Structure formats: structure tokens, C-alpha cells
Image: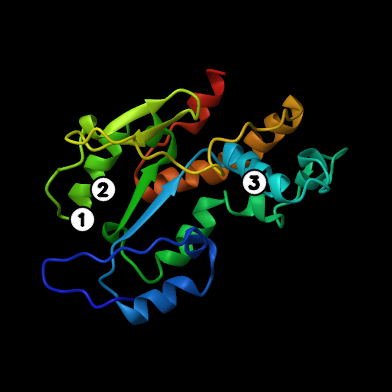
Amino acid sequence: MPKTLEGQITMEKTPSYFVTNEAPRRIHSMAKDTKLIVVVRNPVTRAISDYTQTLSKKPEIPTFEVLAFKNRTLGLIDASWSAIRIGIYALHLENWLQYFPLSQILFVSGERLITDPAGEMAKVQDFLGLKRIVTEKHFYFNKTKGFPCLKKPEDSSAPRCLGKSKGRTHPKIDPDVIHRLRKFYKPFNVMFYQMTGQDFEWEREESEK
């Protein structure tokens, strides 16, 4: 990590930290006062998105439906498949709470980051003890991507959008598989809401579809 001067905040982003068993202990031994930010989204959508990314690099892999089950007839979900295991957030959080208090962890809603980026960024700035500099005027919604892009209000240059790997069209998944996955994740989601004190409304969002 680079040296951090007084009045500076050093940030580092590695998505796999949250699901890596050794990460909390190692980060705690390096800097126990570290503030942690975790972006979470509906685990079903997250699993499909994960599969879509892999599919773009390895088109020969089996279908999502094949990989998601140990036994499709019995409806046994294969929780050892990383695309599914990562979304069991309560399991991973349990590991982190052995080393860090909840007050040092901010959970950002991936859904609200799209629908209300300024609102989620306000929470991030408050959590880091920063002045709320990034506001609504810094965002522009890109209809093609389906994501908000960052822009400098005082600058006429093009907004900065997420790269090609983001916003890919998801393959069509059998609705029965999605239904079974929702049932699989529901108890873990409820546990996660209780642990964090936050309701991410994933079940409500699904019932509206």
C-alpha cells in the first residue's frame, strides 16, 4: 500500500477479498482501523452476471442451468460453484465480523447504486468522514449501458462510463431455475439483513417481476 499522509485516504479495490477466508485476518493484522466498503446485489442476479462474464471468455462452458444444480430432478443447488457461493453473503460476513466491528463496514446496495447513485455515494462519503462533494449533478444515466456514468459538472468532456465488461446482456435462464435459486437464497438473505440491520428488499424486488 502507498504511504498515506495526514488528511489523505488511501483506497484499494479487490472484489475477491469479501469471499476469501484469509483476507479479514490479514487486513486486520495490517491495519485494524481500516474501513471496509462492500457492494452487494441480489444474489440471483449476481450469479447470472458472474456466469455471463465467464461465458464471454469461455463460450464452451455448460449452460447456467447445468452448473447451478448438483441434481436438477431433486432441485439440489450446487453451492460449491463459486457463482452461487459468493452470493451467500451471511456466510462471508460471519468471517469478517470475527475481526471487524459492523461499524467499520459499509454495505452499498448494487441496485440503488444504479437507480440512485448520488444517494448511495452520499452514504459512502459520510462513512469515510468526507464532505458530500459527489452529488446528483455528477451522474448521467446511459440508456444503452443501463448504468449511470460519472461526469464533471464543470467540464464539457464526455462522461466516464463503466467498461465493456459491464452491462452485458444476460442469457435467458429457465424461470424454474430462477425460482429455485430464489428459494435457496431466501434464508441466507434474511440472515444477512439481520446481521447488517439493513433490508436490501431483494425478495420484494423479485415479487414485483
Is 8 left, or right, of 103 in this rendering?
Answer: left
The residue depicted at 67 percent of the width and 37 percent of the height is 181
The picture places residue 112, in percent across and down from the top left corner, at 38, 33
The residue depicted at 74 percent of the width and 33 percent of the height is 177
Q: Amino acid at mark 1?
A: Leu
Q: Amino acid at mark 3?
A: Gln
Q: Earlier in the sequence, mark 2 or mark 3?
A: 3
Nearer the observer: mark 1 or 3; the answer is 3
Looking at the rendered structure, the secondary structure element under dot 2 is: helix
Q: Which residue is mark 3?
A: 53
Q: Which mark is residue 124?
A: 2
In the rendered view, tell whether residue 129 sits above or below residue 9: above
The reply to whether the C-beta atoms of the residues labelled 2 and 1 are less than 8 Å apart is yes
In the rendered view, tell whether residue 63 sits above or below residue 129: above
Is 109 left, or right, of 189 in this rendering?
Answer: left
Tell me the quarter of the image containing the N terminus: bottom left
The picture places residue 201, in percent across and down from the top left corner, at 44, 31
How far apart are the alpha carbons under marks 2 and 3?
27 Å
The picture places residue 145, in percent across and down from the top left corner, at 50, 30
Q: Earlier in the sequence, mark 1 or mark 3?
A: 3
Tell me the quarter of the image containing the C terminus: top right
Q: Quadrant of residue 75?
A: top right
Q: Amino acid at mark 2?
A: Val
How far apart are the alpha carbons under marks 1 and 3?
31 Å
Looking at the rendered structure, the secondary structure element under dot 1 is: loop
Nearest the eye: 71 or 191: 71
Q: Which mark is residue 128?
A: 1
Is 146 left, or right, of 97 in this rendering?
Answer: right
Nearest the eye: 114 or 169: 169
